[in-house]
Amino acid sequence: MLPVPWRYVNSWHCNCCGLCCREYDIVLRFDEWLNLIRRYGVGVTRAGLSRFYIRRRSDGACVFLYNSFGKWYCGLQSMKPMACKLWPFKILEKPRYGKSREAGFTYNGKPFYVYVDPFCPGIRWGPPSQSLISHVIPEFIELALGIRNKQVYSTSSTGFIIHPLRGRERFI
């Protein structure tokens, strides 16, 4: 299913369902791959033809995905890959999936094209809310541009992570 323009989305928030971490390969930038293997060893990654990925468990889930009381949490909050930070949004400098008018978003005077993967169950469809326009999308753009690293609106707001070595810990 192709991504859809952000203007069809009323709101979004991570509901900790874990579908993204079970259904998609997580592509790593070289620096992300290097940081992961330094901290956890090469066994948590795998190489493709031209990319590195986070390894999957036998059930297909990311090796850093943990369940706690029916919710799924990322064990990489402090070093979460960009692909994970941005999902389900795609921030582009040129329209790639059509409907450029609906996907267009101006941030600090610069045009971007923002699409959303409709697979995510955290999407609420409808006219965009003020929060989506003024907080959520700008944060995703800032993450994509490297302006910010800390996530507030673009991640689960549960306040806890499951760390692969230390268990549950507070992060907000």
Image (spheres, grey):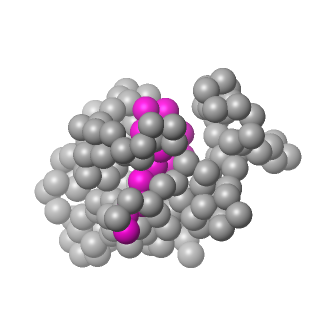
Name which quarter of the figure residue 132 lies in: bottom left
Please determine whether, in this image, residue 126 is positioned above or below residue 25.
below
Of all residues shown, which one is farthest toward the right?
49
Please determine whether, in this image, residue 107 is positioned above or below residue 116.
above
| Relative image position of residue 8 (x, y in whole percent) | 32, 71
Who's the residue at 44% across and 60% down the image?
Answer: 67
Q: Dividing the image into 4 quarters, which one contains the N terminus?
A: bottom right
Q: Nearer the viewer, residue 122 or 157?
A: 157
| Relative image position of residue 93 (x, y in whole percent) | 49, 43
Q: Dividing the image into 4 quarters, which one contains the C terminus?
A: top left
Q: In this orientation, does residue 72 appear?
A: yes
Indicate yes or no whether the magenta region holds residue 80.
yes
Magenta highlight range? 70-84
From the viewer's perspective, is 92 left or right of 105?
Answer: right
Q: Nearer the viewer, residue 7 or 73?
A: 73
Indicate yes or no whether the magenta region holds residue 43.
no
From the viewer's perspective, is 169 left or right of 115?
Answer: left
Q: Nearer the viewer, residue 166 or 70?
A: 166
Who's the residue at 38% across and 59% down the image?
Answer: 68
| Relative image position of residue 56 (x, y in whole percent) | 68, 56
| Relative image position of residue 58 (x, y in whole percent) | 71, 63
